[in-house]
Amino acid sequence: MPVESYDPARQAVTVTPAAVEHFRRQIATNDDATAVRLSVKESGCTGFMYVVDLVQEPREGDVYYALDEDVALYVDPDSLTVVTGTEIDYVVEGVNRQLKFLNPNAQDYCGCGESFSVN
């Protein structure tokens, strides 16, 4: 199954060290996972929502990023236009822990924070 690979200098999605460590812990606790896959789907009142899955292997055409020696990220090729330029961070605020997506393409967010739109 071919997987497209990009030069890290032109990486469409960046991941902070905190998010890489979070993904590493998630992969380590899931016997069926060897990587993380990012995509978007139509959802909510605004348009799109992010989908982060733990996976064993990429789907055909997925773009591959080696985040670290033992952490890989696959990005759905159909989602690239929506997520290009996005930084994924893992943030701890008090007792709350969450992935944050800093997406320069997002123009509007729904009130509950589940979905976003792009132009």
Image (spheres, grey):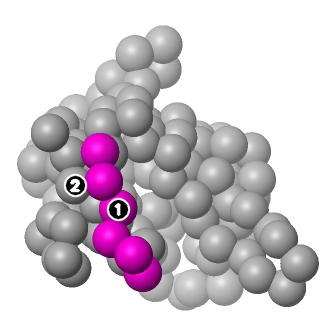
**Coordinates of residue 3 in the picture (x, y in percent):** 22, 41
- What is the quadrant of the C terminus in the image? top left
From the viewer's side, name the closer residue of 55 and 21: 21
| Image quarter of residue 113 | bottom left
Q: Residue at x 16, y 65 (%)?
A: 47
**Labelled disc at residue 16:** none
User: Residue drawn 74% across and 45% down?
Assistant: 17
Q: Which mark is residue 117?
A: 2
Q: Secondary structure at mark 2?
A: strand
Q: Point out residue 50 in the picture as x, y percentages from the top left corner.
A: 33, 65
Tag 2: amino acid: Ser
As helix, strand or loop, the secondary structure at mark 1 comes to strand
Residue 53 on image: x %, y %: 39, 73
> Relative to 117, is 96 on the left or the right?
right
Query: Which of these two is toward me, 115 or 84?
Result: 115
Q: Please indicate, yes or no, whether residue 102 appears anywhere in the rendered image.
A: yes
Residue of label 1? 109
The disc, 2 or 1, on the residue closer to the chain's N-terminal end is 1
- Give yes or no for contact between labels 2 and 1 (Cβ–Cβ under 8 Å): yes
Q: Which residues are magenta?
A: 107-112
